[in-house]
Amino acid sequence: MPADMRAASKPIELRVDLKERSYPIYIGRDILGDGTCLAPYIPGNQVFIVTNETVGPLYLQTLTNALSIVLEPGCQIDEWVIPDGEIHKTLDTYRAVIDALIASRHDRSTTIIALGGGVVGDIAGFVAATYQRGVNFIQIPTTLLAQVDSSVGGKTGVNHTQGKNLIGSFYQPSCVLADIGVLDTLPEREYLAGLAEVIKYGVIADSEFFSWLEDSLAGLRAKLSEVTAEAILRCCRIKASVVARDERETGLRAILNFGHTFGHALEKITRYETYLHGEAVAIGMVLAMQLSRLSLGTSEADVQRLSRLLTNAGLPVKLPEGLDLAEFLNTMSLDKKVHRGCMRFVLVERLGRAQVSDEVDPEAVERVLLSSGLSTHD
Ligand code: NAD
Ligand code: GLY
C-alpha cells in the first residue's frame, strides 16, 4: 500500500541541542505523507527538493502532495533528480543542482529538502550551505544509515577524485524527518549495512543499548516498527548528544568514526566495488576492537560479543583473502583521519566506552592486520 494511504503514527520528537541552531528529529512510520511536521520549518514560499532516480519515483509524489496541502497556495515547489550512486557525489552534480536553483529563480528564502540516502543528503546539504551563502535546509533520510547517522549532525559535502568527502562544510538542517516506512523498499543489503552503524553506537557509547541490540536483533532484522523506531531513536539520541558537545569534531565527535580507519582503507583498496560502507565498517570495527585489545587490554569477551552480533546481523567480520599489508597500511596513512602525521584510531576500553587515540603503536596495527590474514610480499 502506498505510504500516503496508510495511517501515519504520531512521530517521536528528539532535539539536537545546538543553541540557536537546535532542531528536531521526527521519527515515525508513514509520516512522510503528513506535512504537518515539516510546515513550521518552511518559512518562505519556495521549496526545492533534491532526490535521486531511485528514491524519486518511490516517494517524491507523496512528499509534494503533503507539502501542497500544508503550504500556502502558490508556494513554488521544484524538484531535482540526481543520478543514483556514490560516484555521482561530485562537484559536477553539485553544480547541476546549483544551476537548477538559479534557473528556477530560487532566492535566499528558499528551503532545500534532501529526500534520499546519505549521498543525496550530503550533496543537498552542501548546496544548502553554499547557495546564496546558505539557505534553509531539511533532511528526509530514506536509508537506515542516513536516518541514524548522516542526516544528523550537519556534515555535508562531496567527494574529490583524490578522496571521499574532501570538499564540504558543517551545516545543520532546521529539521530531520525519519519515516521508518520508507525502509520497506530499501534493499536488504543496504538495510543491513545501516545496522552496522546502529551497532557502532552501542559499542562506543551505550553498553545497555548494545545488550538491547543483542536481544532485539530478530525484530530489527524483521523491520518491526516499534523495534526499528526504538533503535533509530537511541542512535539519534547518542549522535545528538555527541554533536551537541563537539559540533565541529575537535575531539569527542571523532568517536563516531569507530571502525572507519580500517573500513575506509578496505573500501578504497577494493575500489568501492566490493563492500558497502557499512559492511567495510563492520570489518573495520572488529579490527579496531582487536587493536583495542592489544592497546588497552579490552576483554576477549567484548571482542567476541561484537563479532557475534555483527555476524548475526548478516554482516562480514573478516578481511578478504589476498590483501597486501604494505598497501593496506599505506592506504590507511592517506586517510583524512591522519592527524599531525599520526594515524588516528578510535579504541574501545569496554563495550559502551570509547576513546580517540593518536598514539597507537604501529606494530600493534600490523599485528592485528597480519593476524587477520594480510600477507607481506617482500
Ligand atoms: P546511498 O545514499 O547511496 O543510498 C543507498 C542506496 O539505497 C542507493 O541506491 C539509494 O538510491 C537507495 N535508496 C535510498 N533510500 C531508499 C529507499 N527508501 N528505498 C529504496 N532504495 C533506497 O547510501 P547511504 O548508505 O544512505 O549513504 C552513504 C553516504 O553517506 C556516503 O556518501 C557517506 O559518505 C555519507 N555519510 C555521511 C555522513 C555525514 O555525517 N554526513 C555520515 C555517514 C555517511
Ligand atoms: N558520521 C560521523 C559524524 O557525523 O561525525
Image (cartoon, grey):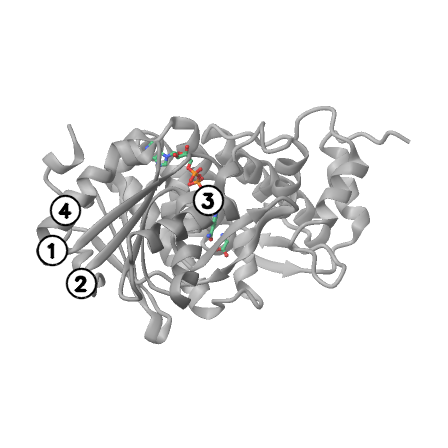
The relative height of residue 244 versus residue 324 in the rendered view (above or below) is below
Residue 34 visible in the current orientation: no
Q: Earlier in the sequence, mark 3 or mark 2?
A: 2
- 3 vs 2, front mark: 3
Assign a secondary structure to mark 4: helix
| 160 vs 317, nearest the viewer | 160
Assign a secondary structure to mark 2: helix
Which residue is situated farthest in the front direction here?
A: 103
Please name the residue shown 75% across and 34% down the image: 371
Say which amino acid is labelled 1: Gly
Q: Are marks 3 and 1 in contact (CB under 8 Å)?
A: no
Please name the residue shown 35% across and 60% down the image: 173
Q: CA distance from mark 3 to mark 2?
A: 29 Å
Q: Which residue is mark 2?
A: 40
User: What number is the disc on residue 66?
Assistant: 4
Q: Are marks 3 and 4 in contact (CB under 8 Å)?
A: no
Say which amino acid is labelled 3: Thr
Q: CA distance from mark 1 to mark 4?
A: 14 Å
Q: Relative to 359, is 241 on the left or the right?
A: left
